[in-house]
Amino acid sequence: MTNHQSKQRKIIDDIERQILSSSLKFSTVSPVTDYENDTRIGLTGVHLPHQNLLKQIHNSLIIPIQKIAPNLYYYSPDSLHFTIKGIRVVNDPPRFDEKIKQTAKDVFARVVPFHHSFKVFLYKLIIFPHNLALVGTTEDKLDNLILDLDKALHEKGIPDDKVYTNNKYFFINMTLARFQERPTSHFINEVHNLSDTMQFMPYIIDSVTLASCNAVFKKREIIESWSLLPLSNSK
């Protein structure tokens, strides 16, 4: 494990402590009764995983969890995604227009293709107040990409409007399910057991997609996708 990954894990551990003490320092999506038709729309940069990873996540995590808690909202395989860089949080009405979308597209087109692909090391399930997420550490190239996008978006007058708990050592996360009410202790225990036993090979993020969508990646518009440079051996 690199020093960068150790710093990421410390932040993840701190977030878990905040969850337990109900003192989260960043914004989350509030629950709704119908996630699929949620009219709150956001603008975000994501990575759409390759089919082999989607299949593993669906079979080894989502299906077992569905057996424990069938009434939660579970992401379909085609909606699973890694969040890379938010621009506008979900809201009704949306906090962006066509001009902001075009500006964001121009920024991503100028920044993303000059960054390298990077490895992701998925290792933990976290139960947030309103969702279940798969998280992982990464190479430091994710920080470089996020900070460059953040700077360029800010220079163009459309800074990210989400509140984050940290401004460095960003980790990767994928939401698997969303809740309408507090999870049961049985669900929490079973998820912890599953988290302790799951195993994933390192995954390479090699592209970034700009999209507008609701919190569960429905009502989505794929604006454009860009490939990252090939994986490099440098840190």
Image (spheres, rainbow, N blue to C red):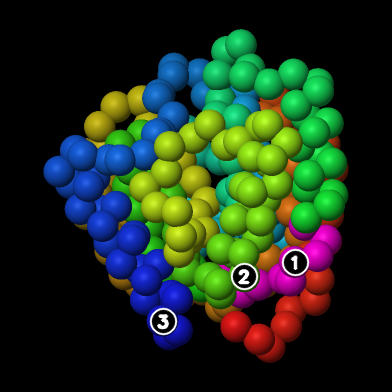
Report the front residue among 165 and 19: 165
Query: In the image as oriented, which residue stretches furthest toward the left?
Result: 21
Quadrant of the rendering where the N terminus is positioned: bottom left
For the residue labelled by badge 1, is the local secondary structure a helix, a strand or a loop? loop
Q: Which mark is residue 3?
A: 3
x and y percentages locating residue 92 in the rendered image: 57, 13
Report the front residue among 103 and 187: 103
x and y percentages locating residue 126 in the rendered image: 35, 53
Residue 188 magenta-highlighted: no
The residue depicted at 38 percent of the width and 58 percent of the height is 125
Q: Earlier in the sequence, mark 3 or mark 2?
A: 3
Q: Which mark is residue 115?
A: 1
Q: Which quarter of the figure has residue 44?
A: top right
What amino acid is at disc 3?
Asn
Labelled pair 3, 2 in contact (Cβ < 8 Å): no
Q: Earlier in the sequence, mark 3 or mark 1?
A: 3
* 155, above or below 34, in the image: below
Q: Earlier in the sequence, mark 1 or mark 2?
A: 1
The residue to which callout 2 is attached is 141
What amino acid is at disc 1?
His
In magenta, the rendered stretch is 112-120
Instruction: Specify whether residue 158 is in view.
Output: yes
Labelled pair 1, 2 in contact (Cβ < 8 Å): yes
* 138, above or below 41, in the image: below
The residue depicted at 59 percent of the width and 40 percent of the height is 86
Q: Label 1 vs label 2: CA separation?
A: 8 Å
Label 1 crowding class (10 Å Cα cut-off): few <14, some 14-19, many 20+?
A: some
x and y percentages locating residue 150 in the rendered image: 62, 47
